[in-house]
Image (cartoon, grey):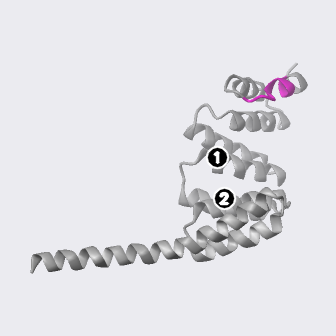
């Protein structure tokens, strides 16, 4: 009887797993199509594909993130911020999600919000060169000379354009 019960539980969870995987297969197909369109700079088509992936799997964090990137490059910065926020809610320890949301907030001229996102990105990954670079430029834009220190940190951690910005902003 115990063997039968154990076998029943095993088969039940195996079938549940397969059902979930089939749903994820559709989501992954839409996501893959979205990435192909994104890489071909067909951002509107990519957004549609990522949306379908999300409809198949509402927890598909990468689809939210990539849709946010496609919206950013389509100049829909508010929509990008919304998608990055969902991605952050689903995976709060991703420095890249915070930095990307900061980039979209920058385009909306929400410099203080963008700096807060850069702060979070750097808190998660203390050598994140791109977050230091963005935060440095934003600080300088707001009149804070400490932005030059951030640009120097960006260069220290490998940001290749750091010297260009240092020469331009930090005299």
Question: Measured along the vertical axis of the image, is residue 123 above or below residue 170?
Answer: below
Q: SS at mark 2?
A: helix
Q: Nearer the viewer, residue 136 or 97?
A: 97
Farthest residue to the left: give it: 1
Q: Position of residue 3 (x, y in %)?
A: 13, 75
Place residue 142 in its image quadrant.
Answer: top right
Mark 1 closeness class: few <14, some 14–19, many ≥20 residues within 10 Å: many
Is 123 within the magenta? no
- Main SS, magenta residues: helix
Q: SS at mark 1?
A: helix
Q: The magenta stretch spans which residues?
A: 159-166
Q: Position of residue 120 (x, y in %)?
A: 61, 43
Find out whether the residues at labels 2 and 1 contact each other: C-beta distance under 8 Å. yes
Q: Position of residue 25 (x, y in %)?
A: 55, 71
Question: Measured along the vertical axis of the image, is residue 116 above or below residue 41?
Answer: above
Which residue corresponds to mark 1? 96
Classify the position of the C terminus by image quarter: top right
Mark 2 closeness class: few <14, some 14–19, many ≥20 residues within 10 Å: many
- Going 47% across and 71% down the picture, which residue do you hit? 21
| Earlier sequence position, callout 2 versus callout 1 | 2
**Mark pair 2, 1: CA separation:** 9 Å
Classify the position of the N terminus by image quarter: bottom left
Place residue 75 in its image quadrant.
Answer: bottom right
- Going 69% across and 38% down the picture, which residue do you hit? 131
Q: Nearer the viewer, residue 30 or 116?
A: 30
Farthest residue to the top: give it: 171
Q: Mark number for residue 65? A: 2
Q: Nearer the viewer, residue 160 or 141?
A: 160
């Amino acid at each position: 009887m115990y063997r039968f019960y154990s076998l029943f539980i095993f088969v039940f969870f195996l079938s549940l797993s397969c059902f979930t995987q089939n749903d994820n297969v559709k989501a992954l197909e839409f996501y893959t199509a979205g990435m192909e369109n994104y890489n071909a700079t067909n951002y509107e088509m990519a957004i549609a594909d990522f949306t379908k992936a999300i409809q198949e799997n509402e927890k598909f964090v990468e689809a939210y993130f990539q849709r946010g990137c496609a919206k950013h490059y389509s100049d829909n910065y508010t929509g990008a911020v919304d998608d990055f926020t969902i991605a952050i809610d689903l995976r709060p320890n991703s420095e890249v999600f915070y930095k990307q949301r900061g980039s979209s907030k920058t385009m909306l001229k929400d410099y203080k919000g963008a700096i807060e996102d850069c702060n979070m990105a750097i808190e998660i990954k203390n050598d994140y060169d791109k977050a230091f670079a963005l935060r440095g430029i934003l600080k300088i834009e707001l009149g804070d000379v400490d932005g030059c220190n951030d640009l120097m940190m960006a260069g220290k951690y490998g940001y290749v354009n750091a010297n260009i910005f240092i020469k331009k902003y930090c005299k």
